[in-house]
Image (cartoon, grey):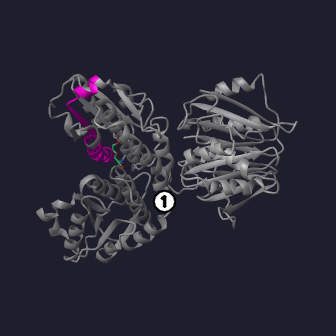
């Protein structure tokens, strides 16, 4: 996650920005930078790789003075961590400066277009196209806000951007597109703040305004104004944030689970950062490595996990078998260790665990270690046992997941298994270099797909109004989306206390179809894929028995609306990413129903965020 802090007012900007970046330290970073308009009218910039302390050390002997500036901490996507790839990025004449969170998916064509205009690039980042585009558009008579607005309309992907200019001293312009990262405006007395998360500015003001997707804000010391990307003025509500860190951490959201659902475009951007070359498709995991020789010798992968993480493993089975041609078994951690499993050095065991402390999963890891299997983990909690026990790990990098019901960790662990599958396929030679870029492009586009679905949350909230009173649900899916039926059912039952069962749709005729009547809604995942026709059959069979059918369908599939009682449409997506796109409405539906039922969404009864006891 990148961190952004901006200030304009009467005080010195640098100390405020540096302290704000420090308060975003939980987001982690590989480089940091700051820009301040100096008394001589030039914008001074200092940048350094590594921890924020390195930048502070550079500022000590070489301070920046001025009342208006920007700061940034970076997770690398395009361009390795280095001083030249650090933000802020500058226009050729140094008069315009940008910081950015997200991925400009069309940066290659924009870079080529700008180079054709004679622009010289100083870095390998996608971000740099933004500052040169703004500079090109900020012709005399065109305000910074208008130039930024026009530039933002050219960008594809989810972004959070803040811009400053020596030509408009004291003015910051902030844009948010999708959910790549928040943009919070802090309203002070004669000063304004902007940050990617409110802990950075809460010590200065509790008056916070949250930019929503496709909105642009202009900040001056005496206030701010907001417009949409068409230039139409917008009025946003000012929130009075309670001082306590918990509500501060929830920001504009009512529950952590809600915040974590809506963070998924950003958390998926972060879990991809620095791990895949979006041009060649080459995957480098860093903390998990295996030689080509050993990868070719692998006979089997055993995935062990619990609950939602186990369902992510079931999705990963399709992807890893499909790309790396490696047989994958998925087992519950709580069952695995009592089976005296057959393991050897040519077996890899993959533990998936958000907390990294689930006792059943850790026990399975111990078993694997004792039997000399190669042990890997996909884990979110940095420094947890599952990270330390493994021979190699992939950090989910989603930031802390506080809600007991796992959401962003689930989609991150599927994405990380996709990266693992591509890495193993590279090492085993089961896909050609020519095939890799297509997977990289699909993954680069994923955050935007996620944003597109989440932006339509109101449709799910309306659907919940028709469903929240039912006391039993059946979730049906097939193929790679069968595990999504399991996950959707688990989400509903664990936060709304409604009985819900996930089932492979093809199994209905072997028993569960006896359950279906008008009191048993069937949630069918029927997006257009290789098992679509089979799913339509299941829907027709449920309807024939007076079932209430809610379908997740592919945009444009109007025939589905003829068959199901309710349909939520998602954008078309590649097979390996469809589980991530399809689970989003199910997360939102579980959340909306639980809220309507007055349940304690973040801390459901009888549950714990990490099951550290048997
Ligand atoms: C998911 O919403 C539940 N909270 C639960 O099933 C969870 O996924 C399971 O306990 C595993 O936790 P872990 O990923 O931290 O190991």
Residue at horizontal 60 percent and vertical 58 percent from the top: 212
Residue at horizontal 37 percent and vertical 56 percent from the top: 583
Q: Which residue is mark 1?
A: 452
Which quarter of the picture shows residue 337? top left
Quadrant showing the C terminus: top left
Q: Between residues 164 and 15, which one lies in front from this camera angle?
A: 164
Judge from the rendering whether residue 272 lies leftward or rightward of residue 326; answer left or right: right
Check if residue 300 falls in the magenta segment.
yes
Does the rendering let one see residue 359?
A: no
Check if residue 349 falls in the magenta segment.
no
Residue at horizontal 60 percent and vertical 59 percent from the top: 214
Judge from the rendering whether residue 73 lies leftward or rightward of residue 332; answer left or right: right
> What is the secondary structure assignment of the residue under circle 1?
helix
Judge from the rendering whether residue 247 lies leftward or rightward of residue 389; answer left or right: right
Q: Which residues are magenta?
A: 293-321
Q: Position of residue 319 (x, y in %)?
A: 30, 44
Q: Position of residue 568 (x, y in %)?
A: 39, 67
Does the rendering let one see residue 10?
A: yes
Q: Residues within 10 Å of mark 1 (few under 14, many from 20)?
A: some
In the current view of this chain or complex, which residue is farthest to the right?
A: 40
């Amino acid at each position: 996650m990148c961190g952004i802090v901006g200030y304009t007012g009467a005080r010195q900007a640098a100390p405020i920005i540096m302290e704000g970046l420090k308060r975003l330290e939980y987001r982690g970073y590989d480089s940091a930078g700051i820009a301040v308009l100096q008394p001589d009218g030039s914008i001074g910039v200092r940048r350094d790789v590594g921890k924020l302390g390195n930048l502070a050390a550079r500022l000590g002997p070489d301070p920046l003075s001025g009342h208006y500036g920007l700061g940034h901490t970076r997770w690398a996507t395009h361009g390795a961590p280095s001083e030249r790839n650090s933000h802020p990025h500058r226009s050729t004449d140094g008069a315009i400066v940008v910081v950015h969170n997200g991925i400009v998916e069309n940066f290659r064509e924009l870079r080529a277009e700008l180079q054709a205009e004679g622009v010289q690039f100083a870095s390998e980042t996608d971000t740099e196209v933004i500052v040169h585009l703004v500079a090109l558009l900020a012709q005399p008579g065109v305000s910074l806000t208008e130039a930024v607005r026009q530039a933002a309309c050219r960008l594809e992907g989810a972004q959070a951007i803040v811009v400053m200019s020596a030509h408009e001293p004291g003015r910051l312009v902030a844009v948010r597109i999708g959910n790549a990262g928040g943009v919070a405006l802090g309203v002070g007395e004669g000063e304004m703040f902007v940050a990617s998360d409110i802990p950075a500015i809460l010590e200065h003001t509790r008056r916070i305004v949250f930019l929503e997707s496709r909105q642009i804000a202009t900040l001056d010391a005496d206030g701010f104004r907001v417009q949409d990307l068409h230039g139409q003025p917008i009025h946003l509500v000012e929130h009075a944030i309670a001082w306590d860190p918990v509500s501060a951490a929830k920001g504009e959201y009512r529950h952590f689970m809600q915040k974590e659902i809506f963070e998924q475009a950003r958390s998926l951007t972060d879990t991809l950062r620095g791990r895949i070359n979006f041009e060649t498709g080459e995957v480098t995991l860093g903390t998990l490595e295996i030689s080509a020789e050993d990868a070719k010798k692998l006979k089997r992968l055993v995935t062990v996990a619990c609950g939602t993480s186990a369902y992510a493993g079931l999705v990963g089975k399709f992807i890893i078998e499909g790309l790396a041609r490696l047989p994958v078994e998925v087992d519950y951690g709580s069952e695995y260790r009592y089976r005296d499993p057959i393991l050897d050095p040519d077996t890899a065991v993959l533990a998936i665990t958000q907390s990294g402390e689930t006792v059943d999963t850790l026990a399975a890891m111990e078993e694997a270690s004792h039997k000399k299997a190669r042990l890997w983990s996909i884990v979110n909690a940095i420094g947890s046992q599952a990270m330390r026990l493994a021979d190699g790990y992939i950090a989910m990098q989603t930031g802390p997941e506080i809600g007991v019901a796992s959401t962003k960790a689930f989609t991150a662990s599927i994405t990380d298994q996709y990266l693992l599958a591509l890495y193993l396929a590279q090492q085993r030679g089961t896909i050609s270099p020519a095939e890799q870029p297509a997977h990289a492009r699909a993954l680069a586009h994923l955050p935007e797909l996620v944003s597109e679905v989440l932006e339509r949350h109101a449709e799910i909230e309306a659907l919940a109004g028709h469903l929240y009173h039912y006391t039993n649900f059946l979730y049906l899916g097939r193929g790679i989306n069968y595990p999504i039926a399991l996950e959707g059912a688990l989400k509903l039952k664990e936060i709304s206390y409604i009985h819900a069962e996930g089932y492979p749709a093809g199994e209905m005729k072997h028993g569960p179809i006896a359950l279906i009547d008008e009191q048993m809604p069937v949630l069918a995942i029927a997006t257009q894929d290789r098992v679509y026709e089979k799913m339509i059959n299941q829907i027709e069979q449920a309807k024939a028995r007076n079932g209430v059918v809610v379908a997740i369908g592919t945009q444009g599939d109007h025939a589905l609306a003829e068959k199901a009682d309710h349909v939520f449409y998602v954008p078309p997506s590649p097979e390996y990413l469809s589980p991530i796109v399809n689970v989003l409405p199910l997360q939102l539906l579980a959340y909306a129903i639980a809220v309507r039922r007055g349940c304690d969404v973040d801390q459901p009864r009888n549950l714990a965020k990490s099951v550290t006891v048997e």
